[in-house]
Amino acid sequence: MSTLSFLVSPSLKKESRKIFENLRINMTDAMRMFLVQVVKRQAILFEIRMYNRDTIEAIEEVKNNLSSLKRYASSEEMFKDLAKDDTE
């Protein structure tokens, strides 16, 4: 066996420990389970993403213009509106 150590905030440690206790596993077993699944799946079990500049700018533009965005009651209504825009 090999030792692995890492730093986390006291609050993260406390909150995660409570969850693991409710699951009836300890912190060591939880971390071992995580690592086994990473190796088995050759992936991290949750999405990690990094946005490029264009995506960040697009997200900010939407956030800044929420009040001016069109809203639809249904997808059918939206597609009718989009089709109308295509014919104009």
Image: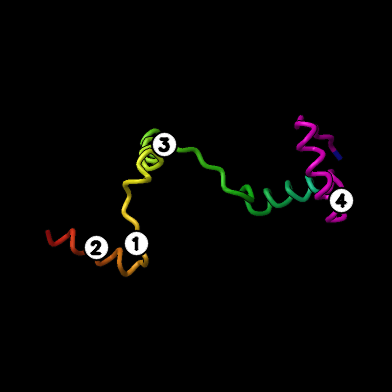
First reached walking from the N terminus: tag 1 or tag 4: 4
- Label disc, if present, on residue 56 of the rendered structure: 3
Identify which residue, 47 or 68, lies in the foreground. Answer: 68
Compute the Cα span from label 2 to label 3.
Answer: 27 Å
Residue underneath mark 4: 21
Helix, strand, or loop for circle 1? loop
Q: Is residue 4 magenta?
A: yes
For mark 3, give the secondary structure. Answer: helix
Query: Do tag 2 and tag 1 residues touch (Cβ < 8 Å)?
Result: yes
User: Residue 71: percent from the left, percent from the top?
Assistant: 34, 57
Which mark is on residue 72? 1
Three-letter code, disc 2 = Asp
Q: Residues within 10 Å of mark 1 (few under 14, many from 20)?
A: few
Q: Mark 2 vs mark 1: which is more N-terminal?
A: 1
Where residue 85 appears, as percent x and y from the top left, is 18, 58
Task: Give the residue type that dot 1 points to.
Answer: Tyr
Q: What's under tag 4, amino acid-wise?
A: Glu
The answer for how far apart the CA atoms under marks 2 and 1 are is 9 Å
Labels 4 and 2: the sequence-earlier one: 4
Give the magenta part as a residue range. 2-29
